[in-house]
C-alpha cells in the first residue's frame, strides 16, 4: 500500500513539474538567437520583420560570436542582414536558434542548429535552389526570361518542384510552416508566369510580344483580395501586386482609359483594407514629375485613402512635384567638386541643354547605364548639350568615386555632390532612388525632372524632338 501511495505521490510531483514547465514555456515571448560569423564584414547582425514592424541589431564580438534575445510579436517570417547580404528566418516564441556562417560564401555556408533548425535550414536550402534558377546573377535572370515559352515554363516548374521536394527532407516542421512555404513556392511560380510576357519582350527586344493563348490559364480567377495570405506570405504580396498591375494594363487598353483610371477602378473592387492601402501606396510612386496626370492621380489617391499619415506624406511629395513641371526654373547646385579640378555650378552650364545623371559607385543599376550613357554621349558629341554626372556617394567613398571615373573612363562633366542624399539639389528634385536622370534647357528651365534613361530609346526621340 505504501509503495502505491509513493508512486502516486511521485506521479503527482512529475505532473506538477510538467505543468509548471509548460506554463513557463507559454510565458516565453522571445527567441534566443546566437551563433558565429566567420570573416565578418560588419560588427553587427541585423534582424528584421518582413513588415518592418521589428528590428534588432545584435553586436558581433571580435571572435565572430553573437548572442541576444529577440522579443518578437508573433511567429512567422523574419530576415537577417550582415552588411549588404541577407537571408530569411522563421521564428517562434521560445525558439533557441544557433547560426554559423562564413560571409565569404554567404548563402552556401548558412547552417542552423537548435529548436528551430529544420525550418531555417530549409529556408537556407530553398534560397540556393531559387538562386540556381538565375545562375550567373543578372545575366542568368536575362537568360531565363529570354528562353522560349515552353523551356521557360519547364524550368520554373522544375524549380517549384525542387523547393517542394526539399521541404520533405526536414521532419521537424510546423504544419502551418509547411503549408505556407508550399503556397509560397506556387505563388512564386505563378509570379514568373505573370511577368514572362513583359520581361521576355524587354530582353528579347520583341516590342509587341504576346504569350500564346492559354499561357496564363493557371492565373485565371487568381484572387488578389486574399487578406489571410496577404498577411502570411510575402510571395503572395508580390504576386497580387503584379497581377493587379497587369489586369489594370489590360483594362486600360480594352476601355481606352489611362492606366491611373484603370487602377483606380480595379482598386474599388478590393475589400481588404490592408491590401487596398498597400496598392494605393504602390500607386503613389506614379505621382511623379514624369507622369503628366500626376495631379489627377494625386486627387484620386487622396479620396481613396483613409490613412492620414500616408496622405500627409503624399501631399508633401506632391507639393514638391508641382514645382518640377516642364517649363519651371530648375533647382540649382553650386560649387560641386569637378573631377577635372575646381568646382562647377549649374549656372556655369547655361546656354546648352543639360542631361544630368544622378548616381553612386555602389549602385548596380547606375553602373549598368554607363555603357548606354557613353554611347549617347558619343552620338551627341559637339552638339548643343552637356552630359553631367553627379555622384551622391558619401564622403568616405570619395576616392572610390575618383577611381571609378578613371577606371570606367567616364566622360562628360563628373561632379561630386556636397552632402550625398542630403544635398539640396537632390532634396529639391525629390530624389529617393537612383539612377535618376534630369533634362534642363539652355535657359535653366526644366524639360523633364525624370527623363528617360540612356538605355531607353525614348531618350534619343526626346533629343531629336528638341533638335539637339
Image: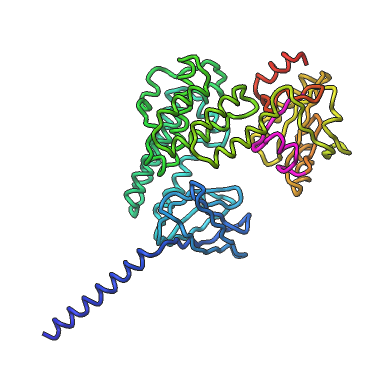
Q: Which quadrant of the view contains residue 293?
A: top right
Going by the picture, which residue comes out furthest to the bottom? Answer: 2
Camera sees residue 231 = yes
Q: Residue at x 45, y 31 (%)?
A: 192
Camera sees residue 157 = no
Q: Residue at x 79, y 30 (%)?
A: 411
Give percent across and percent down for residue 341.
88, 38
Q: Is residue 236 above or below residue 117?
A: above
Q: What span is colored magenta in the figure?
A: 419-440
- Residue 433 painted magenta: yes
Give percent across and percent down for residue 163.
40, 41
Q: Nearer the viewer, residue 426 or 195?
A: 426
Q: Nearer the viewer, residue 432 or 160?
A: 432
Q: Nearer the viewer, residue 218 or 63?
A: 218
Left or right: residue 380 versus residue 208 is right
- Residue 313 painted magenta: no
Left or right: residue 404 versus residue 18 is right
Amino acid at each position: 500500500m505504501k509503495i502505491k501511495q509513493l508512486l502516486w505521490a511521485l506521479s503527482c510531483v512529475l505532473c506538477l513539474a510538467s505543468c509548471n514547465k509548460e506554463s513557463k514555456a507559454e510565458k516565453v515571448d522571445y527567441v534566443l538567437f546566437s551563433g558565429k560569423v566567420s570573416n565578418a564584414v560588419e560588427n553587427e547582425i541585423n534582424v528584421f520583420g518582413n513588415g518592418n514592424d521589428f528590428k534588432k541589431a545584435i553586436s558581433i564580438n571580435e571572435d565572430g560570436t553573437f548572442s541576444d534575445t529577440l522579443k518578437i510579436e508573433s511567429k512567422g517570417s523574419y530576415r537577417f542582414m550582415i552588411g549588404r547580404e541577407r537571408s530569411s528566418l522563421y521564428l517562434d516564441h521560445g525558439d533557441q536558434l544557433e547560426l554559423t556562417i562564413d560571409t565569404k560564401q554567404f548563402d552556401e555556408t548558412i547552417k542552423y542548429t537548435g529548436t528551430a533548425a529544420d525550418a531555417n535550414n530549409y529556408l537556407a536550402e530553398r534560397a540556393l535552389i531559387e538562386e540556381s534558377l538565375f545562375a550567373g546573377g543578372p545575366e542568368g535572370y536575362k537568360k531565363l526570361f529570354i528562353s522560349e515559352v515552353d523551356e521557360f515554363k519547364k524550368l520554373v516548374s522544375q524549380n517549384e518542384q525542387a523547393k517542394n521536394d526539399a521541404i520533405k527532407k526536414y521532419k521537424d516542421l510546423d504544419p502551418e510552416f509547411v503549408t505556407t512555404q508550399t503556397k509560397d513556392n506556387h505563388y512564386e511560380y505563378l509570379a514568373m508566369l505573370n511577368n514572362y510576357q513583359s520581361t521576355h519582350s524587354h530582353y528579347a527586344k520583341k516590342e509587341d510580344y504576346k504569350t500564346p493563348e492559354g499561357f496564363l490559364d493557371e492565373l485565371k480567377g487568381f484572387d488578389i483580395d486574399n487578406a489571410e495570405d496577404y498577411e502570411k506570405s510575402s510571395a503572395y504580396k508580390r504576386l497580387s501586386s503584379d497581377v493587379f498591375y497587369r489586369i489594370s494594363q489590360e483594362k486600360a487598353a480594352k476601355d481606352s482609359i489611362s492606366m491611373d483610371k484603370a487602377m483606380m477602378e480595379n482598386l474599388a473592387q478590393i475589400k481588404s483594407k490592408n491590401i487596398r492601402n498597400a496598392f494605393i501606396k504602390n500607386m503613389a510612386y506614379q505621382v511623379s514629375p514624369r507622369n503628366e496626370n500626376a495631379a489627377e492621380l494625386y486627387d484620386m489617391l487622396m479620396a481613396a485613402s483613409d490613412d492620414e499619415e500616408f496622405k500627409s506624406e503624399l501631399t508633401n511629395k506632391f507639393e514638391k512635384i508641382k514645382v518640377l513641371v516642364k517649363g519651371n526654373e530648375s533647382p540649382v547646385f553650386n560649387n560641386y567638386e569637378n573631377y577635372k579640378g575646381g568646382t562647377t555650378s549649374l549656372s556655369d552650364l547655361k546656354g546648352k541643354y543639360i542631361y544630368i545623371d544622378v548616381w553612386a559607385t555602389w549602385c548596380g543599376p547606375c553602373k549598368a547605364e554607363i555603357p548606354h550613357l557613353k554611347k549617347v554621349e558619343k552620338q551627341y558629341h559637339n552638339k548643343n548639350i552637356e552630359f553631367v554626372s553627379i555622384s551622391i556617394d558619401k564622403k568616405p567613398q570619395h576616392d572610390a568615386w575618383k577611381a571609378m571615373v578613371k577606371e570606367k573612363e567616364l566622360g562628360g562633366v563628373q561632379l561630386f555632390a556636397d552632402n550625398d542624399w542630403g544635398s539640396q539639389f537632390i532634396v529639391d528634385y525629390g530624389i529617393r532612388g537612383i539612377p535618376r536622370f534630369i533634362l534642363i534647357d539652355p535657359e535653366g528651365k526644366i524639360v523633364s525632372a525624370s527623363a528617360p534613361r540612356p538605355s531607353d530609346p525614348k531618350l534619343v526621340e526626346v533629343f531629336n524632338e528638341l533638335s539637339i
